[in-house]
Image (tube, coloured by chain):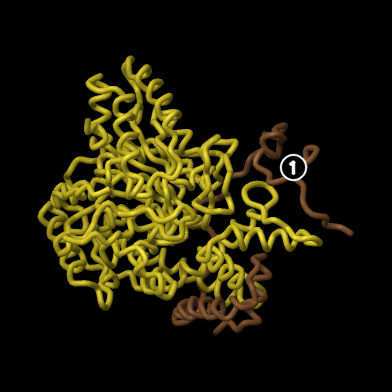
Chain colours: A yellow, B brown
Amino acid sequence: MTLNTLTIAEARDALRKREITSVDLTMSCLTAIDAADGLGAFVHKTPEIALEQARAADARLAAPGAPALCGIPLGIKDLFCTKGVPSQAASNILRGFKPEYESTVTTRLFDAGAVMLGKLNMDEFAMGSSNETSCYGNAVNPWRRQGSNVALTPGGSSGGSASAVAADLCLGATGTDTGGSIRQPAAFTGITGIKPTYGRVSRWGIVAFASSLDQAGPMTKSVRDAAIFLQAMSGHDPKDSTSADIAVPDFEAALTGDIRGKVIGIPREYRMDGMPAEIEALWTRGIEMMRDAGAVIRDISLPHTKYALPAYYVIAPAEASSNLARYDGVKYGHRAKLAQGDGITEMYEKTRAEGFGPEVQRRVMIGTYVLSAGFYDAYYNRARKVRALIKRDFETVFAEGVDSILTPATPSAAFGLGEMASADPVEMYLNDVFTVTVNLAGLPGVAVPVGLDGQGLPLGLQLIGRPWDEGNLLNHAYVLERAAGFVAKPEKWW
Amino acid sequence: MSIDIATARKVAKLARIRVEEEALPALAEQLSGILTFMEQLNEVDVTGIEPMVSVTPMRLTRRADIVTDGGIQPQVLKNAPEAREGFFAVPKVVE
């Protein structure tokens, strides 16, 4: 049985034709998951829920008109609250937390008949680019360098999602992206991942990191799957005041494969000093593929690109320090054991010291600092002004007729787990250099696998779209995917 | 701008995270490194630019000021580390 290797589109068609059942498909994934503990992708398995949902989906599929995701087994990032199922954001401070409610995204997926296989590993509170800050331990990339058994990172923060999809443990997975957390792991594992326009997908019931930047999106084996999956996640939600009351178009129908005359911008500021030759060559190949498909290639300038990362690392920790203030040992999760005479302040301080890992502590403290009296204007307000300039850069090129922007997705291929352990925290932050601008400007961005590097590891390119234009963006990604013809899969070692 | 040990101690206090005295020098150094990285923002001319409040140009919607939820005390308390008689329980706050 290799049903778990199907794409969502293939499984949907076979399920609707009653050639396969959701129960068989789900069993195939559950078997693959049980044989893949070495990947550290699934951290809470939910086989009973999965099989119950699969049986219900099969009953629903007996009649015509079942939704596209009916009977499709998915993995859910641990950041999503799922009723009665541990939802820890990969943090010790939420150990034992079982939500009494269901996030809007998972509610929508379940209403569409999707099957939840379990919860997926991630960086703690989605803060990280290598999945190494997780309280569960590392998620591991199913890809290895040729002739090497060094364990590589699947990227982060949605590392478990990326690893699970790349290893065919599920047909697709939810991810979230605050600075690149869908697109960087997708690129590191040879899969597709889209971060939609801010406001397209409800954030309700997703553990908050930086509320003005967080967006959920799908991680899948193909661009078509991303279109189908995103469709099911999207739409207005009155429970999220930043959710946009804008109609959701048919994303799959937008995949025409025709981009003739479309203008693809190539931002010169993304050609960074010290960029590896392989990344540069991949980008050039991508440009040629789009030109061959009939697109008009145009050099563009996004002059404030260089300031995106420092602006991000002011704004995101500032919002995080506020959002994470709720973890105080009172309402849910961990509370430290107190000593005789300890009062409420000691309870807060000990609980948060024990519950938060080092990277989360650092970011909460940086956020606290930049928001504190005397520094608010110098750091936080200045960063928000720079953010406005970064957004204006994009608005300018879009107003001049650019339809989408093509860039590298990451500055390198997947690196080794532990390789960055002794590095300065800022070095890890550089992973987001190509993706973070998109979050600051609230735009949709998609990572598509395009080739392998000299060591046999996947590399991806990123396409950035106009706000609310995920349909055209996915169509551009579809053209790139077809031209690249990326079909490589990791060799099974786990 | 660099963060000295006294500032690191103060930030940890404000963030309500206990940091042992011997861990403060390393923390101060890391926080300083991150702040140095942020200093690049000073190169940008931001004259006349308004700080961004919302990334999408839309007004936040308002709902009617009426009760829409409630009566779910058991669910609210379900995950509490300590709950007593229908309340969250914490160490004594007022002497």
Please state if A200 lies on the left or on the right of B8 as rendered. Answer: left
Please state if A113 lies on the left or on the right of B6 as rendered. Answer: left
x%, y% of residue A415? Answer: 30, 64
Q: Chain of mark 1?
A: B
Q: Choose between A179 and A240: the one closer to the eye.
A: A179
Relative horizontal placement of residue A419, taking residue A476 as reference (left or right): right
Q: Position of residue A162 (x, y in %)?
A: 33, 50
- The type of residue carrying mark 1 is Ala
Q: Nearer the viewer, residue A1 or A185?
A: A1
Q: Residues within 10 Å of mark 1 (few under 14, many from 20)?
A: some
Quadrant of the image containing the N terminus of chain A: top left
Question: Circle 1 is placed at which residue position?
Answer: B83
Residue A462: where, in percent of width, then height?
27, 57
Q: Is residue B36 above or below residue A210?
A: below
Q: Choose top left, top right, bottom left or bottom right for residue A96.
A: top right
Residue for point 27% across, 55% down: A403
Total number of numbered discs in the rendering: 1
Position of A142 relative to A232 (above/below): below
Rendered residue at 89%/59% (across/down): B95
Q: Nearer the viewer, residue A290 or A76?
A: A76
Q: Position of residue A170 (x, y in %)?
A: 32, 39
Tell me where residue A429 sits by quadrant.
Answer: bottom left
Residue A87 appearing in the image: yes
Q: Residue at x 40, y 70 (%)?
A: A421
Which residue is painted at 62% across and 63% down in the image?
A: A353
Relative placement, left or right, of A134 versus A461 is: right
Residue A247 appears anywhere in the view? no
> In the displayed image of the protein, which residue is found farthest to the top?
A63
